[in-house]
Image: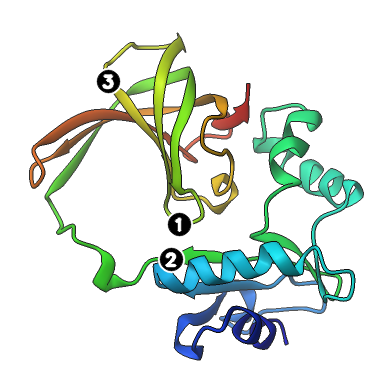
Amino acid sequence: MLMESLKKTADVPWRALGISGSLLVGLQTPKSDIDPVVYGSENCCKVHAALKSIVKDDNSRFRPYTQGDLRKLFEFRSKDTHMSFENFVKTEARKVLQGKFMEKDYFIRFVKDWAEMDEKYGEIRYKNCGYAKIRATVEDDSESIFTPCRYKVKNVTIIEGPKPQPILEIASFRGRFCEQARKDEVVITQGKIEHVMDSKRGLEYFRILLGNKPSDYMALA
C-alpha cells in the first residue's frame, strides 16, 4: 500500500520504485519497518515533493515522527549519535524521508540511475588524511536527499584536527545524514578527512566523510 500511495501521489512509474531491508530478503516480521527505494533524480524529486505535501494532510496514511517517536529513535541511535536530544530533534523532526505509514516506520532511500553517473572507476581517488571537527556554512544542499548525500560548504573553520585546505564538501553513504542541513545553515561536523583527486575534471580538494565511526556527526550550530 505504501508503494502504491507513492506511485499515485508522486506520479512516478513502477520501474522507479523498489524495496530494501528485511522485506527484500523475506525476513520481515510484523514489527519490521519499511525501506522503499526510489530510482532516478527526477523521480526522487517528485516523491520528495509529494511527501512534503502528504505528511501535512491529516487524512493521509503518512505522518511525520512525533516527539515521542523521535525520543525512541534517539535512544535507538544513542550508541552512535553524539549530540543532545534537542539538536537531534532540530534536524530529524523536519525530515520527510522518514516517518510512519499506517503506524509502521519507514525510511525512503533516493538513488540516482546508473545513466546519471558520469564517473568511471579510478577517475576519482580518495586518501585518508585524518579526523577533524569543523564549523561550516552549507552552500548547496541539492544533493542532500540522495544516497550518497553531499553538502557543498563554505566559510569552513577547523575546530579540531588537521587543517587541510580547501574543505569543500561533507558527504556520507549513510541514510541518517540525508536532509541533515539546508542551504545557508551553519553546521558543526566531525568525521574523516579525505583528499579528493578528480583526474577527469582536474579538481583537487578535501571533504569530510561521515559514517565510519560512532563519533561522526553533523548538527546545526
Report whether residue 90 is seen.
yes
- Pointer 2: what residue? 111
Residue displayed at 28% across by 15% down: 164
Few, some or many residues within 10 Å of mark 3 (<14, 14–19, 20+) = few
Q: Residue at x 71, y 45 (%)?
A: 92
Q: Which residue is mark 1?
A: 147
Determine which residue is flagged by label 3: 166
Name the quadrant containing residue 193: top left
Query: Which amino acid, by three-letter code, is at mark 1?
Result: Thr
In the displayed structure, 47 sits above or below 168; it is below
* Mark 2 burial class by Cα count in 10 Å: few <14, some 14-19, many 20+: some
Pick the quarter of the image with the C terminus.
top right
Image coords of residue 70 (percent x, y): 82, 47
Residue 33, percent from left and from top = 73, 69
Q: Which quarter of the figure is the N terminus placed in?
A: bottom right
Compare marks 1 and 2 and give the one earlier in the sequence. 2
